[in-house]
Amino acid sequence: MSMFSPFTKPFLHPLDGNDDFVKEIGKRKWLPYNGPKVNEFELRVKDCLNVKHFLFLKNGATALQIAIKSLELKGEIITAPFSHPSIIGGIIREEG
């Protein structure tokens, strides 16, 4: 049992017609990013790549925030002219 739990009970559409993997997730009703299937995925990728650490993140903005903070980056950050607003928001949050 994980120390994390869902904040709310998710509404799931009927699972009929889905494969067993999706049905198993639906039965658990665990959709947050630290659920059992995510943990299993992280372990499998870590083993496959033969690396010490591997972290599955929900999006690129979160990955950028972690990179900026862990590498202690300071100064100007240049992005593509058509970056998604959430990417810019993640950068601004870490600079602030």
Image (tube, rainbow, N blue to C red):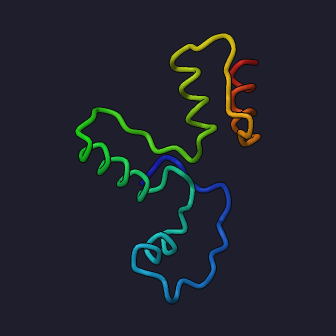
In this image, 59 relative to 51: left or right? right
Q: Position of residue 56 (x, y in %)?
A: 46, 45
Q: Residue at x 41, y 59 (%)?
A: 37
The image quadrant where one finds the C terminus is top right
Q: Extreme front residue here? A: 81
Query: Can you say whether 57 is above or below 15 in the image?
Result: above
> Which quadrant of the figure has residue 84?
top right
> Which quadrant of the figure has residue 95?
top right
In this image, 14 relative to 80: left or right? left
Q: Position of residue 38 (x, y in %)?
A: 43, 54
Query: Can you say whether 36 is above or below 69 in the image?
Result: below
In this image, 13 relative to 50: left or right? right
The image quadrant where one finds the N terminus is bottom left
Q: Position of residue 54 (x, y in %)?
A: 37, 38
Query: Can you say whether 67 is above or below 61 in the image?
Result: above
Q: Residue at x 74, y 34 (%)?
A: 81
Q: Position of residue 62 (x, y in %)?
A: 60, 37
